[in-house]
Image: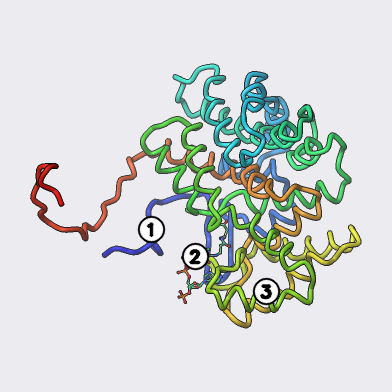
Amino acid sequence: MTTAGLEDVVATTSRICDLDGELGKLTYYGVDIHDLAQHSSFEETAYLLWHGKLPTQAQLAETESALHSSRALPGRLIDLMHLLPPSMSPMNVLRTVISALVAFDSDPSDTSAPANERRAIRLTAVLPTIVMAWNRIREGLAPVEPLDNGSHAANILYQLTGKLPDEYTAHALDIALILHADHELNASTFAARVTAGTKADMYASVVSALSALSGPLHGGANEQVIRMLHKMNDISKVEPYLEDALARKERIMGFGHRVYRTEDPRATHLRAMSKELGERTGDSRWYEMSQVTEAYIKEHKHLNANVDFYSASVYYMMGIPIDLDTPIFASSRIAGWTAHILEQYANNRLIRPRAEYVGQKVTEYTPIDERG
Ligand code: CMC
């Protein structure tokens, strides 16, 4: 039996992430996402995803230090970015530069698990450096060197402006990164595992994941959400906008989910952060418009907000440019992708499903000059 979009098809086994769409429950190696959001850091969560257990103090310190020392980008990749047209989308630049990063791997022939674990750290550390360097280069500015200490979240915000972020904003971004770090067999993770399943290298697998993430039905939704809020622009315009959009059968970005039939547990935290950021920045408009949108879509379409909905206003109020929303998602999900790639390599079998053939069974070959 075929299932469009592989809906509900179980395509692999995994120990990394468990997702209960009916209960709205999400765990990484059994640790509840709410506990991680409340108590963990992105670095600790990444360690959990890579190693299957929470780190000791020493293991965490070692991972943080490895991440710090892997943040810098080879100068030739900065040169490569200078050659790209400033209009190129950050997601397209990201996959291009990650693809080129393979040339700077000290020993591409080493496909051992420790070498791939080192690559996972390097890719995680360097990914936001590429995003933030591109954001500066396209504006004709010199990239900001990454911090040689501090959290992944603080370093992302620092490279955006060259100024250290305040404690609250860095902490809020850290939580957002934890919430986005993994999500079972979503489209980009599946793409990564399909590529890894051919024994292609980790860079190629991450390029597949980035490509899948960029689409508006997946990670690209957060950018579309903030664009929609800008079109509405005022709380009084929210309902008329949505009425028109639904009448035109448009999809409202940031709503609906293939698996969740209830509140996305990640949205719970992002909603609260959006509210708090509105209060702190003195501009609650984005949160308020989001709230009205959420209530309207719930009433008229019975759909819940997903992770992309409130993350859009959260990132916007943090001063993150709109088209960097999806790259910020990638700056977190890279931990999950690389964990899944490591898991795929460790117990590999080529992923090669079948298609049900629904075309014509026999077609005679007609010579070209006889075709009408
Ligand atoms: N707005 C309006 N209608 C919707 C939406 C939406 N966002 N989502 C689903 N529907 C409707 C859809 O039109 C269909 O109605 P009908 O049966 O009358 O044609 C019904 O709900 C079922 O939709 P579906 O496309 O069969 O459901 P799916 O499981 O394939 O869709 C989805 C999942 C995420 C692609 C979809 O909900 C969607 O397009 N959402 C908007 C994009 C979005 O927010 N993506 C982010 C997903 S979560 C995080 C991530 O992956 O980044």
Q: Point out which mark residue 241 bears.
A: 3
Residue 344 in sight here: yes
Q: Where is residue 364 in the image (x, y as percent from the top left)?
A: 8, 50
Residue type at the position of mark 2: Arg
Indicate if the residue with disc 1 has its beta carbon within 8 Å of ligand 1.
Answer: no
Give the residue number, with chain letter if any, for mark 1.
Answer: 10
Label 3 crowding class (10 Å Cα cut-off): few <14, some 14-19, many 20+? Answer: some
Q: Which residue is drawn at 75% across and 39% down?
A: 156
Indicate if the residue with disc 2 has its beta carbon within 8 Å of ligand 1.
Answer: yes
Give the residue number, with chain letter if any, for mark 2.
Answer: 258
Label 2 crowding class (10 Å Cα cut-off): few <14, some 14-19, many 20+? Answer: few
Label 1 crowding class (10 Å Cα cut-off): few <14, some 14-19, many 20+? Answer: few
Residue type at the position of mark 1: Val
Using the rendered view, name the quadrant where residue 64 is placed.
Answer: top right
Could you give the CA–CA distance between mark 2 and mark 3, rounded to whole angstroms?
A: 25 Å
Q: Which residue is drawn at 63% across and 19% down?
A: 76
Q: Is disc 1 in contact with disc 2, using a CB cutoff of under 8 Å?
A: no
Q: In terms of secondary structure, where does tag 3 sit? A: helix
Q: Residue at x 47, y 37 (%)?
A: 205
Residue 58 in sight here: no
212 vs 161, left or right, is: left
Q: Where is residue 225 in the image (x, y as percent from the top left)?
A: 66, 61
Q: Where is residue 78 in the image (x, y as percent from the top left)?
A: 67, 24
Could you give the CA–CA distance between mark 1 and mark 2, rounded to whole angstroms?
A: 13 Å
Q: In terms of secondary structure, where does tag 2 sit? A: loop
Could you give the CA–CA distance between mark 3 and mark 1, rounded to whole angstroms?
A: 38 Å
In the picture shown, does residue 178 fall above or below 204?
Answer: below
Q: In terms of secondary structure, where does tag 1 sit? A: loop
Q: Point out which mark residue 29 bears.
A: none
Ranked by sequence position, the earlier of labels 2 and 3 is 3
